[in-house]
Image (spheres, grey):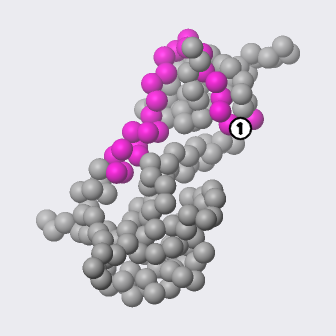
Amino acid sequence: MAVANWIILELCDFIDNISYKDIETALTVTFGDTVEYFIPMHFEEMGSYTSTSTLMDGYVFLKDCSGVQESLVNIKDQKFFSKVLCEKGKFVTVDSRVIAGLKNKLRNTLKKKFTPGSKVKVLDGVFKNLIGEVLCVEDQGRKVMVKIKRVSREMIAPIPATLLEKVI
């Protein structure tokens, strides 16, 4: 089986907080709906929460093909893209094995080990900065059921593991 190469596209560093959706939209506008890309960032909506995790800031990977190479001249039309990494007049590429390894690392950043009964702090969302107790872990460590006690009531909420931190 042939190993495909992926072109490295650098994102503009003077734009703060570029979201996954912004990058995705810019990629499909510039390269078309069929472009194969890897954004080293995870984005998932879980109910009212948005779970995000960034493996590597500042880069996007595009599977090398003639259509991508022809469209690279259009990257200056998108404010999010800075340049294609080149060395000695040739594109800097990584092979698909490297991309597969990065995808695996990113998946692993989404999973956290919380034990039932442990205390956690919610980092974002409706329950931001509240302390709760882990009831159970679901979706292979990606979602945690947390019981949060308030003076007037007790709530149980599913919260993405990326939005929790252990309280010691």
Of residue 58 and residue 54, the one placed in the foreground of this image is 58
Above or below, 16 against 30 in this view is: above
- The residue singled out by tag 1 in the image is 125
Asked whether 108 falls inside the magenta stretch, the response is yes
Q: Position of residue 130 (x, y in %)?
A: 72, 24
Name the quarter where the C terminus is drawn: top right
Which residue is at a point 56% across and 21% down the rendered structure image?
Answer: 166
x, y percent for residue 143? 53, 33
Vertical order, 162 against 106 (above or below): above
> Is residue 122 left or right of 67 when viewed as pictured?
right
Q: What residue lies at 46% left-to-right and 75% top-to-bottom?
A: 83
Q: Residue at x 57, y 83 (%)?
A: 77
Observer able to see residue 167: yes
Task: Choose between 141 and 18: the one closer to the eye.
Answer: 18
Inspect this view and state whether residue 33 appears: no
Q: Secondary structure at mark 1?
A: loop
- The residue at 36%/44% (across/down) is 105
Name the quadrant of the N terminus: bottom left
**Is 113 one of the magenta-colored residues?**
yes
Bin the neighbour count of mark 1 within 10 Å (Cα to Cα): few under 14, some 14-19, many 20 and up.
few
Q: Is residue 26 above or below residue 102?
A: below
Drawn side of residue 133 relative to residue 107, left or right: right
Picture coordinates of residue 63, whole percent (x, y): 34, 71
Quadrant housing residue 68: bottom left
- Left/right placement of residue 81 relative to residue 124 reads left
Closest to the observer, 78 or 134:
78
Residue interval drawn in magenta: 102-126
Q: Amino acid at mark 1?
A: Gly
